Structures are given as structure tokens and as C-alpha cells.
Image (spheres, helix red, strand yellow):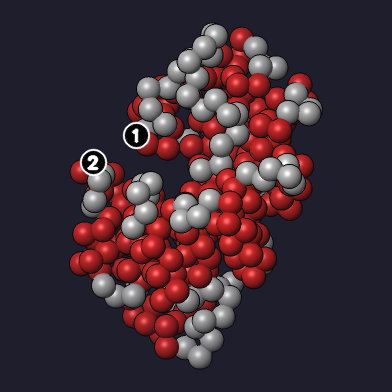
Amino acid sequence: MPAVSTTSSFRTFLFRGASAALLALALASCSTTGKDKMTTGSIPTASKPLDTMNSTDLAQATATYGKAYDANPKDRDAGVNYANALRMSGRNDQALAVMQQVAIANPGDRGVLAAYGKAQAAAGQLAEALSTIDRAQLPDRPDWRLVSAQGAILDQLGRSVDARAKYRDALLLAPNEPTILSNLGMSYVLTGDLKNAESYLRSAVAQPGADSRVRQNLALVVGLQGRFAEAEQIARQELTPEQANANVAYLRGMLAQRNSWQKLATNSDAKQTVQ
């Protein structure tokens, strides 16, 4: 990993890592089809959620979903499943292209609109994603997942105040939901407020439904405050040795320039928005 030689570049490095984690968690928790575990028809069934698969399983699932999509590009579930697998594989532009075709074939489908918005956000089309997800939302029966996803996109756009308002709206709909609390915590990371970030992330981890992604966010925040042994212990919970080693390596990379972080933490503008 390249060295981070200045406070400014470290801030950029931190922003990219934290914002990517925030957006990934928000979009992964955003249900789009209402039938995430397919059991009927000719649509293939995944053995486990895509976000828990290793690279080999994910490649196989992507190929399987791709065949189903090729057989019927207008099928909403085949298209959404394939796009989700492509996004999880990092093939965001291709996922967006798939969802564009599915959206054309299913113009009034809210689930398709939500999936299309997710694909736009992952591909960097943030303003467009906000508009698309807003069209997928029902004002009289709002989906907390979509509200939280909007918050994550607003954070990407640097609108932290608006983002946190969305997260709090989502918490009214789903009190103590760990993914929302995690997103709220990561929002504070993006503005350099690590104490508030840790508080929300610890609350998220304490909830019954918290998963390993939430714990990895907590590990990152704890490590950024210089408590690396504690961060590594958190990072290794509930993961395979391969996953744990990869996450710990990432944490070590984030903290390799600890002196740069310490300069940032003591700088007079440390709590301002990370650029």
C-alpha cells in the first residue's frame, strides 16, 4: 500500500475507505425484489447471501445468474439477481448496464427502481441514484432500507447534515436497526468525529442482528484511535481465517501511517468535513 505522506492525503485516504464501507453496507441492506431468496420458477437459487460469499462462490453465482439473465433479459428477478452479483464482484458499470435494461422492461416496478438506484450509486451516479430511489419509495409506507441508502448517498455527496437526518428518519421506522446505526457511525467518521462514530458503532454491534460488516466498521474506528490490539480482536470475530486476515491486513494498511493520523487528530480543523 502506498505511503501517505501528508495530512491532506491521509484525509482523502480515510474518506475513501470509510465512505466506501458506508455505501456498501447501506446498499447491501437495501432489499430490492422482496424475494431475495428465490425458491420458485426457473430463477436459480443462491446457497447463501451474496455478501457472505468468498470470491470463488461469488464468481460461480455470478455466472449462474448471468445465464438466467441471458435466457430472459426482461425478467426482473433474473436481472436484479445478476446485477447484485455483478456489484458484489466490483463490476459496477456492467451491473448498471443490466439494470438499465431491466428498468426499461419494467418501468413501473418499485423493486426494479430500487435496484436501479443501487446500481447507479455503486457506479458513482449519486445524484441520479437519489432521484431513482426517491421514485421507488412510498411516502405512506416508507421502506427504512431505502431511507438509509439515501443517507449513505448524501454522505457520499458531502451532505452530512442531510444524511444524518435520513438515518434518524430510518431509525424511527426501524428502531435500533444495526445497519442504520452503523451508517450513522460511519457518517461521523467522514467528518473526523471518531468518538461519536465509536458510540454509534458500539450501539450497532450490541444489537441482535449485527453482522460482521458492522463489526469491521467498529474495528476500523477503534484502530484509527490508536487501539490496534482491540481493533484486531474485533476484526477477527465471526470470520473465517482468510476473511479475518484480509480485514486485519486492511486495518494495518489504514494505520500504517499512524503519525499522519495523529497529526490529523490534533490539527485545529480535525473535526471538519473530510475532503
Q: Earlier in the sequence, mark 1 or mark 2?
A: 1
Quadrant in which the N terminus appears: bottom left
Query: Residue at image x 53%, y 51%?
Result: 174
Q: Nearer the viewer, residue 194 or 250?
A: 194
The circle drawn on residue 240 is 2
Residue 158, above or below 95: below
Q: Nearer the viewer, residue 197 or 273?
A: 197
Identify the residue position indicated by label 1 in the image: 54
Residue 87, position in %: x, y? Answer: 54, 37
SS at circle 1: loop
Mark 2 neighbour class, 10 Å CA radius: few under 14, some 14 to 19, many 20 or more? few
Residue 89, position in %: x, y? Answer: 48, 35
Quadrant in which the C terminus appears: bottom right
Residue 105, position in %: x, y? Answer: 76, 21
Q: Are the residues flagged by discs 1 and 2 in contact, CB closer than 8 Å?
A: yes
Residue 65, position in %: x, y? Answer: 52, 19
Q: Nearer the viewer, residue 260 or 116?
A: 116
